[in-house]
Image (cartoon, rainbow, N blue to C red):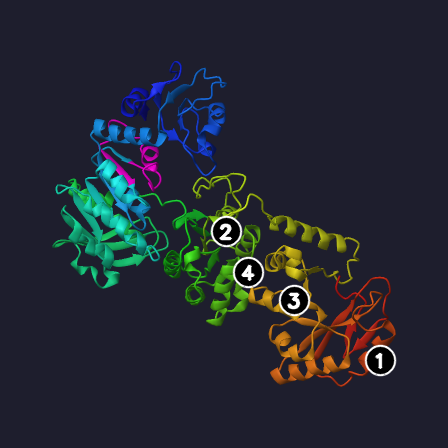
Amino acid sequence: MINLYHLLDAATGQLFGEPAAVVFPDFCADIRRLEPGQLYAALPTELGDGHRFIGEAIARGAAGVVCVDPPAQLDWTGVTCVVVHDIRAALLQWAVYALQRYGTTVIALAGADTAVAREAVARVLRTRYRAFKSSAPCRTRDDLPLALGRLEPEDQFAILELAGDVAEIVAAVGPMVGAVTGIAEGEEHRAGAYRALVEGLPPEGLAVLNYDDDVTRNMAGAARAPVLTFGLDTSGLAYGSDLLAYNIKPLRYRTAFDLRHDARRYLGRWIPLLGTHQLYGVLAGMLVGLAYETPIEEATQALTDLTPIRGRLCPLEGVGGSLLVDDTHDATVESTLRALAWLEQAREPDGRLIFVMGGIEAAGWARQNLRALGRRVGGAADVFVAQGHMAAQVGRAAVDAGMDPARVHVTFSPADSVEQARADLGPHDVVLVKGGASARMDQVVRGLLDDPARDAALVARPQDAGAGVQAAWRPSWVEVDLDAVAHNVRRLKAHANQDRAPDSPEVALMVVVRANAYGHGAAEVGTTAALNGADYLGVGSLEEGVRLREAGVDAPILVLGYTPGWMARQAIVHGLTVTLFDRETARAFDRAAGEVGATARVHVKVDTGLGRLGLPPDDVARFFRGLHDVKSLEFEGCTPTSPTRTPPNSRARGSSCTPSGTC
């Protein structure tokens, strides 16, 4: 809650015209998220200078505006306008002023999984006090006033998550308690910032540290305040911690554990959160509660009412009564492995474990990480839906580790991921969806909900004109709509078969994706086409076909261009169908197939008018008669180079070769 006169006092601001509203429920600096009645702060954002959107903010119902230069041409009737010299400085001054005026004690959290710690600290303290919690991490001092906008005078505690410029925020608000929940893999460079929180605590304060993490535990030497530690017995090190969770049992809907604090034991405790790692934030919450006279018994009882956090192993009701688990808040190697560790514990008799993965953060793209993930996926999941290039690499690693290729499904769009994952889902099945914003995995979760209207529990993603573009360094881009590709393929397949007699074979459809699908992305377009009705993919060269196989595409692929005999083994090993039009190459493929104990699938290319590649129509029968003794070739059909002339039907080894065996 922001009081106008507190803001004017703290920031030495001035009114532009007469004030309309005096009290505002919150600040807002992102025009896309503005709610009626809020105080719009015209700060620079990723959308540009906030002053550009003042008129839109008023139109959307902003009750007030904080700015440097109010546009005189706007109608300010019913809107309070506060003019300041520096918006950033003014809002920060208000935040410090409000905390001091209300006498609110700040509890600062930093490190991995602070969202869980925030909820746990708030739940424990609220058993005895009024406690405010921020809704998002504070990365810079600019975030601090936005995080505290809903703070009220009655709030005795303010629980803040810190990230980014921790030292500056600590200097501004002076927290009494600081908790470091650990350092995530790949975030080691943040250790100095977290240490600044511990160093900035006053002697009468409290530092709460993760004992299992070596770097975090060693921060105790920098603290002027007393230190309490917490840990899990899974580490083998945590027995020296002040608060220990042991006998940990990850269950389908909760995590059970026992506790040891000093010489006392607390048996049979549980939280309604999934995954052993979430206990770190919970234990931090208990220690903060102890510092403010909330006993362990009272704290553990309160924590049974914790609400799972959106996008962090959050259980939802899925299609067919299945358990749908949303883990789409982020996607690192470490968090993916933790999610898979929980999945392994979630099996029920007659149930399947289905893992849908969309990608991980760029820092985790190392090949060894992907192969380690693949091995873990193969051991944890019954079905793996891999969306995108990176996930496809994980899928190949899972197959290499022994997973049945038939249980690995590569996709390139959320819609196709949904279709692959939802097949025959039942009440004993578990579907775990993992991935970040760039992969749009929240759309996969939405598509697997039993009731799509219940999407309030999903991760909120801001929507804007460029939401689908990642790291757009130029103001223009090409965006391929794979949903449109899927729709078009389904329509083409339906059109090709609309006049088919009931007892006649279905007309097959081949989608040509040569030259990287003409610049649209061969793997993405090809996979989407195959999942939506295409029977074959066509490429121009063996190299293009191999690249599709390496991208995880398992649909039938026909190489339309010339493939020399010395490439026969590669074509056969990768399961590619080639086009032939001379006996020498055909016999080379027959020999190579015999050597590897396989069958080479081939089409015969017939030149029907283009005059580029292929047999003249009159030579087709002679060509087949010359190959009567081949043993390892399977002739699937004839491929015309142009529809201007039709070659005669011909037969070889009992296979029917038609003028257009593939449409």
Q: Which residue is mark 4?
A: 410
Question: Hey, what amino acid is under mark 2?
Answer: Ala
Camera-nearest label, 1 or 4:
1
Q: Which secondary structure class fits the magenta region best?
A: loop
Q: Identify the mark nearer the N-term, 1 or 2.
A: 2
Distance between mark 4 and mark 2 Cα atoms: 14 Å
Residue 36: % across, % down: 44, 25
The amino acid type found where label 4 is placed reads Val
Residue underneath mark 3: 556
Q: Residue at x 32, y 45 (%)?
A: 163
Which of the 4 image quadrants contains residue 206? Answer: top left
Among numbered discs 2 and 3, the one appearing first in the sequence: 2
User: In the image shown, does 140 or 32 lie closer to the viewer?
Assistant: 140
- Compared across the picture, whether 487 is left or right of 367 comes to right
Residue under label 1, please give it. 622
Using the rendered view, name the quadrant where residue 99 is placed. Answer: top left
Report the disc number at residue 439: 2
The question of residue 66 being in magenta is answered with no
Residues drawn in magenta: 133-160
Element type at mark 4: strand
For marks 1 and 3, give the one nearer the viewer.
Answer: 1
Q: Is residue 223 above or below residue 34?
A: below
